[in-house]
Image (cartoon, coloured by chain):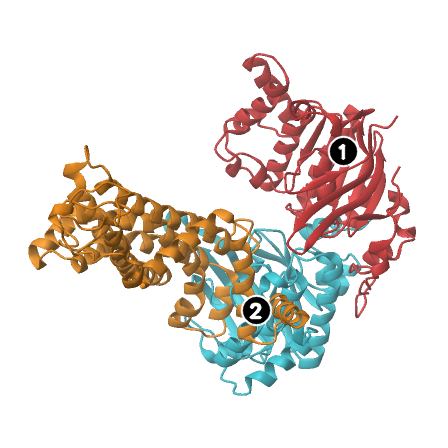
Chain colours: A red, B orange, C cyan
Amino acid sequence: MSLLEVENLWVRFPTRQGIFNAVRGVSFALERERLGIVGESGSGKSMTGRAILRLIRKPGIVESDAIRLEGRNLLELSEPEMRKVRGQKISMVMQDPKFSLNPVMTIGDQIMESYLLHNNTSKAQARAKAIAMLEAVSIHDPERVMRAYPHEMSGGMGQRIMIAMMLIPNPQILIADEPTSALDVSVQRQVLDIMDGLVKERGMGLIFISHDLNLVSEFCDRVLIMYAGRIVEVCDADKLHQAKHPYTQGLLNSLPRLDQPKKHLEVLKRDDGWADGESVGGS
Amino acid sequence: MSDMTSQHSSWREWLTTDAPTSRRHARLANLYQGWLTLRANSMAMFGLGILLALLLVALLAPVLSPHDPFEQSLSNRLQPLGTEGHILGTDSLGRDILSRLIYGSRITLYIVALVALIAPVAGLLVGTVAGYVGGWTDTILMRITDIFLAFPRLVLALAFVAALGAGIENAVLAISLTAWPPYARIARAETLTIRSADYISAIRLQGAGALRIITKHIWPLCISSLIVRVTLDMAGIILAAAGLGFLGLGAQPPSPEWGAMISEGRRFILDHWWVATVPGLAIFTVSLAFNLLGDGLRDVLDPKDGSQ
Amino acid sequence: MTALTIKELNVWFGTDRDRVDAVKSASFDVGIGESFGLVGESGSGKSTILRAITGLAPMWSGEITVEGKRIQRATRDRAFYKTVQMVFQDPYASLHPRHTVDQVLSETLHLNGFKDINTRVVRLLDDVGLGGKFRFRYPHQISGGQRQRVAVARALAGEPDILLLDEPTSALDVSVQAEILNLLTDLRNEHKLTYLMVSHDLPVIGHMCDRLAVMKDGEIVEVMETDDLRHGTAKHDYSRSLLAASAVA
């Protein structure tokens, strides 16, 4: 039994021009591994992550045969039951900590709030836990950070705090939606290494959503490539450069490379057929 | 029959095309999209319907009104609702309330139109210039705005009446003079945000001067929020005019202004409640209609989903 | 004569105690017809240099020389705008939301004093690979890549010699980036333009530029040829670490 199984996920949005299908028949399974979901804007990758956590509100429609967390179908849960799952079993780190941390609460208060929501302990214990968590994400001055506000933190620190906050309830799965896209290149490595370490240490599953194919291939075990709401290819991360689907190859070839100077970059020639094919299973 | 439908559908196609062929075409297509969004909001449509009805009533007042609004009939005073020939009853001088209501709609529209023309326009001018030019101009203009903001509306109206005599025009002037500062503030705040946008930098790099930037680039963006704000303020403006009328500072008797009608009916509220209540309901309905329309317009002109 | 010479450029914001020095003693040259890159992370001051050149950052000291003419004052004149133009980073913010593509280009052409506006608009759209069906659309009706093409068309409308490019593809998808970069390469060859390009993305700079300067905390730490970058022979420690961080597995 896999940690997470998604079967035939569809996410639809009714618009004035008809129904727009953001995610079309996506299926995959997640073990205790690092799974990357790669795609460009509009590919449906973020929607997939949100659909798993049932964060998509009306008028969005989520349909799936099943979304099973350790055998339990999340779609059958009531909203209060789902709230227990969110944060405690499956957690999500988003792109820009400026927008996902509450600007009017101190960082300490926010992390403690996250902990107390899922654990019935005293404030003092929550505080100790929060400080321990901040140290686990390599923040060397946790007392000061606890008293600070989000706007006083740099991007990299903010993301590390976000990771601390999301991991404090000890979830089994972490969904990271473009966690390093807003960060500088030198800080990206740091944050990814921390996330990697924690995920391995706790035996969690990680779903890493990104548009950066190279980053994902370095960081994950397996990669799903999405295009127009479908999964067009699944492969092991270290075999990415042997990818078969023309979209994946096109993406890889259109990136400028320092070691391969060219006059013109190869432009991806989109084939309408890619959007129509069956979604490849990702188990 | 099929010819009509094919013509109809070709109009729709023309308006919803994704490849407009001229500027006018693009603008009309955009307006049509906005209209479709507004049409989907039933509350806003309800508000719009009421306002259109108001407009019609005001235009067709001589036709629709069963009696002369000024015709007194002392033997017929304070007749209740449903009296024969006077569906909404008569007031303390025997004048038909329905007719007075119908003619009063003209005055209401007059007030609304005048204030809507003066206050937001003045506010837009002051606010955008202050916001764009900055420095001393900004400081001076904003302090002037603060001075006008500090005036209580009724006190200013009293001052005007004392100086220029009572009347509807002076009431409108008094209301406009106290209504424009918030628009200036909004326009200035928007201008400050817009000013730092890349598209303004880009046009500055083409050598555009302040006048062009303010009129062609900043105003089009401020106007949406101003329109929304004006419709939402309409309710307050009507009530302010009614309040002034109630105090005898606005429309003078025998003018059928709705606020003045409430004032006249005040004495009889216990036994002949309809004399004051019916015009009150009219004011309530029109204010509500403006509010609903304003809300709907906000969704069209100022969508928060960031798509525009 | 160089296209652009920057000597001991300092740019700052705020005064006295609140003063923040965004650029400190920056110096470099860009030859005519050359493509020069400015690389650095956020906060390194690279975009600020562009803003100082165009007059959008008013407080600066040092020397800025464009095609042999020293820039003396805080504002720029018409001759400057006919020589230097800029393409901005965020395609979603660089076009006025209420103006059609046609309006954007027509206004630019009008401000530059051209009379045959209609023909030029058609030709500009053609040059950047957009067809006639985009001409009367509003920005929210076109994609990010298409908006960036319009921004490039706008920059080229006045027939400038030098284009300043502020992270032109950072906000775009990878596949769209390739198209825009190819477009920029072709336009440079066709119109014999000089490019000063800012980016945090080393491979993009490596692809587009002949020479580059690496910036950190407002200072230029190294100026080098792109070949040095490719062969990993960067001299300064920071350049090396930047190179290492962007290395592909």
Q: Where is residue A201 in the image (x, y as percent from the top left)?
A: 78, 25
* Rendered position, C36 above or below B229: below
Q: Residue type at mark 2?
A: Met
Specify the subunit that label 2 lies on.
Answer: C
Residue C75 lies in quadrant = bottom left
Q: Which residue lies furthest to the left in this view?
A: B162
Q: Which of A194 and A25 is in front in this view?
A: A25
> Which numbered disc covers residue C110?
none
Q: Residues within 10 Å of mark 2 (few under 14, many from 20)?
A: many
Residue A72 lies in quadrant = top right
Count every numbered label the image shows and give the total: 2
Instruction: Say which element carries label 1.
Output: helix
Q: Residue furthest front?
A: B84
From the viewer's perspective, tell me whether residue B113 is left or right of residue A166: left
Q: Where is residue B169 in the image (x, y as percent from the top left)?
A: 18, 60
Tell me which residue sits at (86%, 59%) in the image: A273
Q: Mark 1 points at which residue?
A: A196
Q: Name the residue under label 2.
A: C86
Residue B271 lies in quadrant = top left
Q: Residue type at mark 1?
A: Asp
Q: Residue furthest bottom?
A: C115
